[in-house]
Image (cartoon, helix red, strand yellow):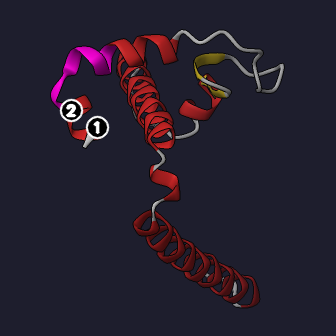
Amino acid sequence: MLLSSILKNPGYFFLLLLFAGTACESPTHDADETPIAQVGDKVLTLEQLQSDIPYDTSAADDIALIESQRNSWIRQQVLAEEAKRLGIHTDDEFQRRLERLKDELLVKILRDAVINEYIEQNPVSR
């Protein structure tokens, strides 16, 4: 399969990463947010990453963590673009897994809503 040959050749992967990471398209983010990466039409902002970083990290740790998460995000976006290019998103196995993930997400959202409603109706007292 083409995908296995791509994964076996790291040079091709990094070339693909380089091209996708330097794509020049109009930004699709809020004007008050700072873009730090773009792959295709998807933009990652500093604010999105910072919202996922724990507050108890030092400034030096923040920079390293942001860089690591940015690189991880770029890698994920490039691989998703390649999967789409290969047509994996139209595969029957992909559609089955997608439906299973949708069901799991629906259940999680329902559980969260029930828990939030219970908490609102039964506030914790001293």
Q: Mark 2 sits on what residue?
A: 5
Query: Which residue is painted at 29% across and 39% down in the image?
Result: 3
Residue type marked 2: Ser
Q: In this view of the protein, can residue 54 be seen by the observer? A: no
Mark 1 falls on what kind of element? helix
Q: Position of residue 75 (x, y in %)?
A: 39, 29
Q: Is 59 displayed left or right of 111 in the figure?
A: left
Contact flag, marks 2 and 1 (Cβ < 8 Å): yes
Residue 20 is inside the magenta segment: no
Residue type marked 1: Leu
Front-lying residue, 21 or 3: 3
Give the quadrant of residue 94. Answer: bottom left
Q: Is 52 displayed left or right of 1 in the figure?
A: right
Give the quadrant of residue 65. Answer: top left
Query: Which residue is painted at 23% across and 14% down in the image?
Result: 11
Q: Position of residue 70 (x, y in %)?
A: 45, 24
Vertical order, 115 against 26 (above or below): below
Q: Mark 1 sits on what residue?
A: 2
Vertical order, 8 against 32 (above or below): below
Give, as a single range, the part of the protein colored magenta: 8-14
Crowding around mark 2 (Cα neighbors within 10 Å: few <14, some 14 to 19, many 20+) is few
